[in-house]
Structure formats: C-alpha cells, structure tokens
Amino acid sequence: MQINKVEICGVNTSKLKVLTEAEKERLLRSVRQGDKSAREQLVNGNLRLVLSVIQRFTNRGENLDDLFQVGCIGLIKAIDNFDIGQNVRFSTYAVPMIIGEIRRYLRDNNPIRVSRSMRDIAYKAMQVKEKLTNDTQREPTIEELAKEMNLPREEIVMALESVVEPVSLFEPVYSDGGDTIYVMDQIGDKSMDEDWLDEITLKEAIGRLSDREKRILSLRFFEGHTQMEVASEIGISQAQVSRLEKGALSKIKKHI
C-alpha cells in the first residue's frame, strides 16, 4: 500500500515510524515488565500494519477512520496477548487479530437484525473454536464444536451463518477505468484471507533457512532439477543434497 500524505484519525501516515524486528522484540519484553511507554511505542510503530489490513475492507463503504480505530484495538489486543516465547514474528500473530476485530465490528454493525440468542450461540462457538484451534493446532469441525457446546450441529451452523456479513456477488472489487472485477470473479476454493496469511507464514519460514538451503529448494522445486543435478551444480554429494533438502522442508513444516 502506498502511504503518501494521507490522514486517518488525524494521523499523517507519511510520518509513521516502522520498527525493526529487533526493536519490536525489545519493546515487547519491556511491555511484559509493565512499561507503558514501550506499549505506546509498539502501537505507534505498527500503525502501518493496521493500515495495510484495513485496505482489504475499503470496498465495503465503511468509514476508514472507524476501521482504523477498530484495527488499532485489534493491534493493542495482539500486543497484550503476544507470547514472546513463541518462534513467530509479531506481525504474523497481529494480522489475524486485527482482521478479527474488524470483522466483529462489521458483524455488530450489520443492518440485518439477528436475534440475541442466535448471536450468543455464534460468539460462544467462535470462542470454543479458538480454544480448540489452540489446543489441537488445527481448525475444529462443526461436529467437534457441537459436541463441545452440547448443541445440535444445525443450530451452530445457522448461528455462525447469521453473523456473517452478506456480500453481493456483483459488488465491484477493482476497476481501472476499463473492465470491472466483481466478487464473483474472485471466488475460489480457499478464502483470500487464508491464502494471504499462508503466504506470509511461508515467506517467513523460508526466510529462516540458510542460503544453501534456499538454493537447494529453488533448484529442486522451482527449476525442476534432480538431486544429482543440484549436487553437481552446488559441488556436494547427492546424499548431502537429500539431507539438506529434508532438513529445510522439516524446518518449514515446523514453522507453519
């Protein structure tokens, strides 16, 4: 996203500070020790992250100032709940938190009225879903949610569907003055949010590899070389290529 003399909530986005990973880690540790100044610096140093996320919701006709403020609430929650002991970047953890806060805001301001009992079931299901996801490291099925909540499967499905903001298939997504791209043109098998977060996670995982490991994976999976060809080009044995390749893939899998 290009940031150039745009003001949101009175903030001149062209002057926003960007923190390095080392600065974030230092400030996060200070926050855990109760340093309020460090918490404020972390918020200010990650406002561009909030701006990048709200760009995904600009086609909904919502006020950008409102979305920005809601996104900042998600950022603050991410700062307060981030576990510095986990081997993951803060941005990887914060983005879903910011998106979740914005989505809750959009659901709560949905003009279609949903009964209080239905909304309560939906929000309870979301909490249970988050807990099960953390416990099992995977997204739970509807059947698992139903068993955990002791409710019929159909009731949970209806409740979750009731708080999802409806979007027209003919809602324009992009136009450059020529042909307009609509929502229906971008429907796929996986949600765009999942794709985007998966891409961020994968890039971070690959970024943790050594130059040699990156080179081997590039030759093997992007250029289609055999292990023997890779060994010849790099100047090591095929057995070493195989070991390094397996090790690199294992590191990526562990990070993801």
Image (cartoon, helix red, strand yellow):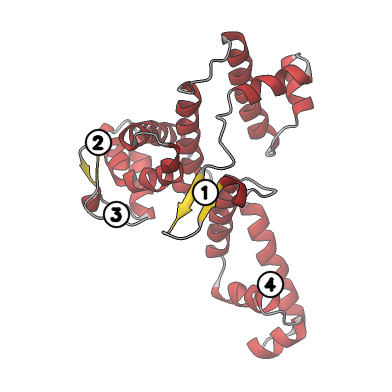
Q: Residue at x 42, y 59 (%)?
A: 176
Which sits earlier in the primary sequence, circle 3 or circle 4?
3
Q: Is residue 114 left or right of residue 190?
A: left
Foreground: disc 3 or disc 4: 3
Q: Nearer the viewer, residue 241 or 47?
A: 47
Q: Nearer the viewer, mark 2 or mark 4?
A: 2
Disc 4 crowd, CA 10 A, few/some/many (<14, 14-19, 20+):
some
- Residue 3 is tagged as 3
Question: What is the distance, in whole Å, between disc 3 and disc 2 at their CAs?
Answer: 15 Å
Q: Marks 2/4: CA distance?
A: 50 Å
User: Which residue is at the far front?
Assistant: 178
Q: Position of residue 45 (x, y in %)?
A: 30, 46
Query: How far, Cα to Cα, is label 2 from label 1?
Result: 30 Å
First in sequence, mark 2 or 4: give its number.
Answer: 2
Q: Label 1 sits on what residue type?
A: Val
**Residue type, numbered disc 3:** Ile
Whichever of labels 3 and 2 marks the residue nearer the N terminus, that label is 3
Q: How many marks are shown on the rendered structure?
A: 4
Would you name the residue on which mark 2 appears?
9
Q: Where 201 sits versus 11, above or below?
A: below
Residue picked out by circle 4: 244
Residue nearest the observer in this picture, 193 or 171? 171
Numbered mark located on residue 88 in the image: 1
Measuring 66% from the left and 53% from the top, which residue is drawn there? 254
Residue 144 location, quadrant: top right
Q: Amino acid at mark 2?
A: Cys
Residue at the (33%, 51%) spot, across then down: 23
Measuring from the top left, give residue 214's x and y in whole percent: 59, 72
